[in-house]
Image: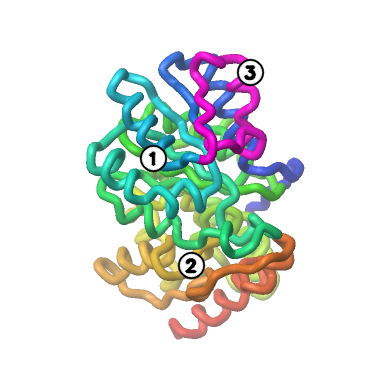
């Protein structure tokens, strides 16, 4: 069984900052806008090195989206930065009308997503953003799993024509994907090959899926682990190829089970290859204050929950 090494915990928002810094040096069309959270979004280096291409908008997220849409008309590639809650829920009308409907080349970059925002509590812990964004026609939705993948995704979306929602987080998490990787939008990554159950994970739950696969292997259950970093467009072919082999699937995400990755996978299976599925996600609830680790355990977003879901779904296919 293939294993992965954690090269050191890093926060994914720093991967975004590193990617943006590199883009500042290599792509003069890239501009950055921030809604009063430069340090939190790790946009400091870009601001320092390219002040003429950086716009501090202040606590005016709707204005930031409108400015970004306007900048694309002049050929710029704007990257907006704020918390995921403010990047989506607060400005959904502006995104729908000025970005998605108009097919503007805006990159909406959102940090502090999900429960792992932690102590700031339910008002800031958006668990609906993937659903909101994937329903917008033409919107690409990306949810990265570690520092290296976030950096690579940040660089890759600059070359993608059209609106993108890039989601990442605040806590330090295992960094295990290759440093020199090439990020391919819409392409799933098979991390572990297995025969008994497919585990499809996104974001912070990818590492938890790898940990679950190790434990399941010791129990005699062969788990295939797939990293879905791009939720839209979804890699239907990779999902079907795996589930046709294993016969069942667990989806794992730091998001409400309604509207997230799990529902996208369920649609693919319902239309092409119906199979038993279990969902590891929040159960139609808001979050609460607590440390990221406490919240992930309480809401069942960890390897233990993935193991239980895998055991259950394997039993269902018999």
Left or right, 22 with respect to 298, comes to: left
Residue 287, image x, y percentages: 59, 68
The magenta segment: 35-59
Q: Is 226 rendered above or below residue 176? A: below
Q: Between residue 121 and residue 140, name the one nearer to us.
A: 121
Q: Is 29 rendered above or below residue 59? A: above
Disc 1/disc 3 C-alpha distance (Å): 25 Å
Residue 205, image x, y percentages: 59, 59
Q: Which residue is mark 1?
A: 164
Q: Residues within 10 Å of mark 1 (few under 14, many from 20)?
A: many
Any part of residue 194 in sight: no
Q: Residues within 10 Å of mark 3 (few under 14, many from 20)?
A: few
Mark 1 falls on what kind of element? Answer: strand
Q: Which mark is on residue 48? A: 3
Q: Which residue is mark 2?
A: 256
Disc 3/disc 2 C-alpha distance (Å): 37 Å
Disc 1/disc 2 C-alpha distance (Å): 20 Å
């Amino acid at each position: 069984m293939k294993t992965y090494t954690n090269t050191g915990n890093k926060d994914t928002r720093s991967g975004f900052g590193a990617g943006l810094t590199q883009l500042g040096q290599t792509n003069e069309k890239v501009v950055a806008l921030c809604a009063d959270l430069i340090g939190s979004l790790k946009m400091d280096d870009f601001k320092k090195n390219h002040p003429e291409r950086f716009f501090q908008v202040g606590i005016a997220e709707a204005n930031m989206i409108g400015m970004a849409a306007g900048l694309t008309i002049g050929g710029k590639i704007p990257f907006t930065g704020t918390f995921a809650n403010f990047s989506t829920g607060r400005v959904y009308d502006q995104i729908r009308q000025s970005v998605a409907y108009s097919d503007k080349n805006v990159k909406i970059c959102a940090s502090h997503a999900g429960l792992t925002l932690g102590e700031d509590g339910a008002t800031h812990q958006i668990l609906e953003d993937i659903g909101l964004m994937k329903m917008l026609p033409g919107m690409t939705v990306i949810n990265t799993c570690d520092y290296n993948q976030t950096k690579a995704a940040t660089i890759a979306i600059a070359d993608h024509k059209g609106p993108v929602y890039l989601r990442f987080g605040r806590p330090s998490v295992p960094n295990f994907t290759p440093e020199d990787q090439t990020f391919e939008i819409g392409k799933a990554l098979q991390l572990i090959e297995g025969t008994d159950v497919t585990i499809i994970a996104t974001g912070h739950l990818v590492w938890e899926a790898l940990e679950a696969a190790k434990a399941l292997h010791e129990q005699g259950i062969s788990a295939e682990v797939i990293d879905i970093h791009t939720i839209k467009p979804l890699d239907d072919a990779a999902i079907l190829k795996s589930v046709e082999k294993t016969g069942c699937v667990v989806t794992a995400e730091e998001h409400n089970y309604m509207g997230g990755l799990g529902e996208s996978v369920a649609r693919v299976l319902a239309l092409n290859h119906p199979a038993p599925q279990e969902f590891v996600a929040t159960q139609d609830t808001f979050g609460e204050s607590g440390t990221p680790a406490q919240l992930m355990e309480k809401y069942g977003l960890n390897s233990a929950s993935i193991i239980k879901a895998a055991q259950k779904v394997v039993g269902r296919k018999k």
